[in-house]
Amino acid sequence: MGTKAREIVGVNVDELLKMLKRAYADEWLAYYQYWIGSKVAVGRMRGIIAGELEEHANEELKHAGMLTNRIIILGGTPLISPQELIKESGCGYEAPSDPDTKKLVEQNIKGEHCAIMTYKKILDFINGKDAVTCKIVLEILEEEITHEQDLEAILADMTTPVK
Ligand code: FE
Ligand code: FE
Ligand code: MG
């Protein structure tokens, strides 16, 4: 555990750890939602959408890794069971029970909206008092914003009438 690393954080570390752990749970659930969605997808633009979902899945898993590393350095314990992931998640999990590609895209846009708000809240909480966490969270937030953009662009393509 990083003794000095913890010391230089200018906010309540336990509060910060709670937020990071909630985001960590979200990332794993987002990973699984994207990953299984990419497998079951059927319907319009399936190839493109399955590829995009798989790409996002990999990035969510990378985010989970970035958060775990920070949680451990700050002296926290990452969640160690799938049950905890569900219990501690802020954004929750939406099973792709309808595998229609448009439904999947809409579900995942909802997830990205929640993720963007989660990271914005963490950044507001840190508010210049923990540059290291700020850098990590900002990098994740930038990717969530790109995910939202990619999916909203796909949805726009899907809903443009064919001439
Ligand atoms: Fe993510
Ligand atoms: Fe994302
Ligand atoms: Mg993308």
Image (spheres, rainbow, N blue to C red):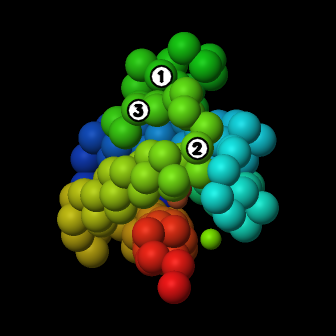
Q: Tell me which label, 3 or 1, sits earlier in the chain.
A: 1
Is residue 139 rendered to the left or right of residue 110?
right
CA–CA distance in space, label 1 to label 2: 24 Å
The residue that mark 3 highlights is 92
Q: Residues within 10 Å of mark 2 (few under 14, many from 20)?
A: some
Residue 123 lies, with reference to residue 161, above or below; the image says above
Q: Amino acid at mark 2?
A: Asp
| Residue 69 appears in the figure | no
Which numbered circle lies on residue 100? 2
Residue 18 position in % (x across, y down): 35, 36
Residue 29 position in % (x across, y down): 55, 36
Q: Tell me which label, 3 or 2, sits earlier in the chain.
A: 3
In percent of the image, x 28 and y 58: which residue is there?
A: 117
Q: Are marks 1 and 2 in contact (CB under 8 Å)?
A: no
CA–CA distance in space, label 3 to label 2: 21 Å
Residue 44 position in % (x across, y down): 64, 58
Residue ranking furthest to the front:
163
Residue ranking furthest to the top:
83
Badge 2 element: loop
Q: Are marks 3 and 2 in contact (CB under 8 Å)?
A: no
In percent of the image, x 53 and y 79: which residue is there?
A: 162
